[in-house]
Amino acid sequence: MHSTIVLLPGDGIGPEVTSAAEQVLRAVADRFGHTLTISSHPVGGAALRAGEPPLPNATRQACLAADAVLLGAVGDPAFDTGSSVGRPETALLQLRQTLGVFANLRPARVWPGLEDGGAFKPERVSGADLLIVRELTGGIYYGEPRGMADDGQSAFNTMRYSRPEIERIAEVAFKAAAGRRGLVTSVDKANVLETSRLWREVVTDVGARYPDVQLKHQYVDSCALLLATSPLDFDVVLSGNLFGDILSDEAGAVVGSLGLLPSASVGGSAGLFEPVHGSAPTIAGQDIANPIGAIASAAMLLRHSLDAGPEADAVEQAIGATLAAGHRTADLVAPGSTASIGGARMAQEILGRVLHPS
């Protein structure tokens, strides 16, 4: 296999975790006899600091030519003021549209050994394994018109969804559920929002094509409660852009840390893969960041973009074995504990198990 991968390290802890994921990808290539051409390009605040727009044209073209794109994180407090066009996060929205990736897959599972590592009682979360399927290129993040009033005293955004947009993301969710435990929980706010009423109608129509998959409708506020209190009741969670963004972060608390969560954005010319966490600038450069989310995103890249299932399994097994051996980054231990290791050490532990599985 010969594949081209574009790395977008981005901002904050992005370069650290992306470097860890790159090392793992190269280890996979060595172990399985593949050839990977990997190049790195600026995006977000890193591009702005170089005098470029958040998504430089050269970066855009490299992504379009690649088999897959692995992103670290975007976000830089130095650019938090001013119009949205000049913010680092704009690059991510533009990149999703450029690649045409409309389906965001965010798996969240409690790894064995981490049942007591989060904010919830172990008996509530042990065995939790869910997949959030989030619509990625519609909804309030992209709706027009949007803007700020000239006097700065009011602002407005538009939430908009079409039947085809809802139908295609629902198909992704039902197909995923058919290969898992056969349950789709569709999240909306149909008691208040017209977009959610259309969402519920279309999802119900799609669900009728999958008689072996159970469909439940859940208001987003109720879903947020149940995700925290009964996470084992969920299999595939289907949601729009805004609700999925929020619920997937909540899932980080369920599994123990946002630093564990990967994501895959698919459906377009090349898949876009990234850890769910943000740029976390306050801990950048301190060897604190957990690289597992980025490494698990690399596993999703192997599976979804390169059709390399055994290779993806090898990476995920290495993550599990490393955690089973008791290795923990700072986000996975109690505050003040000295039992943690740095992000670089965690990456090396996983890397060793990819190259030399027991």
Image: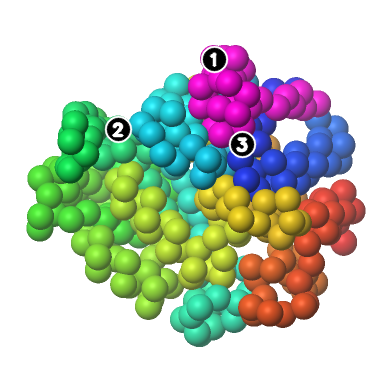
**Residue 158 versus residue 194 in the image, above or below:** above
Distance CA(mark 1)–CA(mark 3): 15 Å
Q: Amino acid at mark 3?
A: Gly
Q: Quadrant of residue 195?
A: top left
Residue 72 in the image, given as x and y percentages of width and height: 62, 41
**Residue 247 versus residue 13 in the image, above or below:** below
- The residue at the point 76 percent across, 72 percent down is 340
Residue 114 in the image, given as x and y percentages of width and height: 63, 74
- Using a 10 Å C-alpha cutoff, classify the residue at mark 1 as few (fewer than 14 neighbours), some (14 to 19) or many (20 or more): few
Q: Determine whether the residue tagged by mark 2 lies in a helix, strand or loop.
A: loop
Report the mark closest to the observer, 3 or 2. 3
Contact (Cβ within 8 Å) of mark 1 with mark 3:
no
The segment highlighted magenta reads 35-62
Q: Quadrant of the C terminus?
A: bottom right
The residue furthest front is 151
Of residues 84 and 310, the one nearer the viewer is 84
Which numbered disc, 1 or 2, marks the residue that appears first in the sequence? 1
Q: Which residue is mark 1?
A: 57
Residue 272 is one of the magenta-drawn residues: no
Q: Amino acid at mark 2?
A: Tyr
Q: Which residue is mark 3?
A: 10
Which numbered disc, 3 or 2, marks the residue that appears first in the sequence? 3
Q: Is residue 261 visible?
A: yes
Distance CA(mark 3)–CA(mark 2): 22 Å
- The residue at the point 85 percent across, 32 percent down is 33
Q: Quadrant of the N terminus?
A: top right
- Using a 10 Å C-alpha cutoff, classify the residue at mark 2 as few (fewer than 14 neighbours), some (14 to 19) or many (20 or more): some
- The residue at the point 56 percent across, 56 percent down is 261
Q: Which residue is mark 2?
A: 142
Left or right placement of residue 265 versus residue 349 in this view: left
Residue 300 in the image, given as x and y percentages of width and height: 60, 43
Q: Amino acid at mark 1?
A: Asn
